[in-house]
Image (cartoon, rainbow, N blue to C red):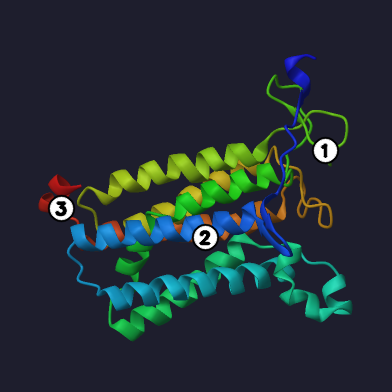
């Protein structure tokens, strides 16, 4: 078999079966992502000397979990859901059947973060910077899980790394899940980690997260198969790209505004030496 027709290594989306209890890799990815983000948040809170208490950190993490799940599900129903949700509205709550939207989850976590920032009397942008650094780890794990599930594959290709997916027909396709895992996961995390160890105006890390994810998503969508129920939305553009454009604009604006304001965040030369 030539390299141009690599066969997808069929992987079980179920990580563990304990009688009637089924634990899927997708659920474990969410848990691991939140745990990693919480640990990074705790370390940065200490090194940046922000002074958020342990109880407040727990509030931030719990609010983030609720925001991601509720926002991600509602976003999927609104942006990608078909008429089935009108016929069976209770399916909105059937998260175990799959269907989560990144952009909806982002909206949910931003709303939750804003509420928590008001509740604990902290700067929203500072909290956003704090939470942004660990976020790409969740993106990385989520995209790897998409690959494990054999879903969200790319368009057909004759590239030597093209892969035949079980549900993607007989032709090799771009493993677009791995492209996204690399760009919006690994690369974006390293960029934000580097920024977190240097002096920068408040809000820069958050803005780079938004714009960095948006650029990665827009680029990969050019080789990712559009959602079957939607297809292309405007010419050659997909729903993922259209949703990422305003995200890119907001991210660039946040960075521009932060640099213009010039309010240095908590990362100081002292904290740089500790990192």
Is 164 placed above or below 205 here?
Answer: above
Quadrant of the rendered image containing residue 257: bottom left
Viewport quadrant of the N terminus: top right
Residue for point 50% across, 70% down: 65
Secondary structure found at label 3? helix
> Residue 99: x percent and y percent?
72, 62
Label 2 to label 1, Cα distance in Å? Answer: 27 Å
Q: In this rendering, which labeled residue sits more in front, label 3 or label 1?
A: 1
Residue for point 55% across, 42% down: 181
Numbered tag placed on residue 31 in the rendering: 2
Numbered tag placed on residue 166 in the rendering: 1
Callout 1: 10 Å neighbours few (<14), some, many (20+)?
A: few
Quadrant of the rendered image containing residue 100: bottom right
Residue for point 20% across, 71% down: 51
Residue for point 62% across, 67% down: 72
> Residue 86: x percent and y percent?
85, 78
Secondary structure found at label 2? helix
Mark toward the start of the polypeptide (2 vs 1): 2
Label 3 to label 1, Cα distance in Å? Answer: 49 Å
User: Is residue 197 in view from this perspective?
Assistant: yes
Callout 3: 10 Å neighbours few (<14), some, many (20+)?
A: some
Mark toward the start of the polypeptide (3 vs 2): 2
Quadrant of the rendered image containing residue 190: top left
Question: Number of marks in the image?
Answer: 3
Q: In this rendering, which labeled residue sits more in front, label 3 or label 2?
A: 2
Q: Nearer the viewer, residue 252 or 87?
A: 87
Q: Which residue is mark 3?
A: 271
User: Is residue 257 in view from this perspective?
Assistant: no
């Amino acid at each position: 078999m030539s390299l141009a027709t690599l066969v997808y290594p069929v992987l079980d989306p179920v990580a563990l079966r304990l009688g009637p209890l089924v634990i899927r890799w997708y659920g474990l990815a969410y848990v691991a992502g939140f745990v990693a983000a919480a640990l990074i948040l705790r370390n940065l809170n200490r090194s940046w000397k922000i002074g958020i208490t342990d109880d407040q950190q727990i509030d931030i993490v719990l609010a983030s979990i609720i925001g991601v799940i509720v926002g991600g599900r509602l976003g999927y129903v609104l942006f990608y859901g078909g008429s089935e949700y009108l016929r069976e509205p209770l399916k909105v709550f059937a998260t175990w059947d799959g269907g989560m939207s990144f952009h909806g989850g982002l909206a949910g976590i931003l709303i939750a973060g804003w509420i928590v920032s008001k509740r604990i009397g902290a700067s929203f942008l500072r909290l956003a910077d704090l939470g942004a650094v660990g976020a790409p780890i969740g993106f990385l794990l989520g995209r790897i899980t998409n690959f494990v599930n054999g879903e969200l594959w790319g368009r057909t290709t004759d590239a030597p790394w093209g892969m035949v997916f079980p549900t993607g027909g007989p032709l090799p396709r771009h493993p677009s899940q791995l492209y996204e895992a690399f760009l919006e996961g690994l690369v974006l995390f390293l960029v934000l980690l580097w920024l977190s160890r240097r002096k920068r105006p408040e809000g820069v890390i958050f803005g780079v997260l938004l714009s960095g994810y948006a650029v990665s998503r827009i680029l990969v969508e050019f080789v990712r198969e559009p959602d079957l129920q939607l297809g292309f939305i405007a010419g050659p553009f997909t729903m993922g790209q259209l949703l990422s454009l305003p995200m890119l604009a907001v991210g660039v604006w946040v960075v521009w505004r932060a640099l213009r304001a010039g309010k240095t965040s908590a990362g100081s030369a002292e904290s740089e030496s500790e990192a």
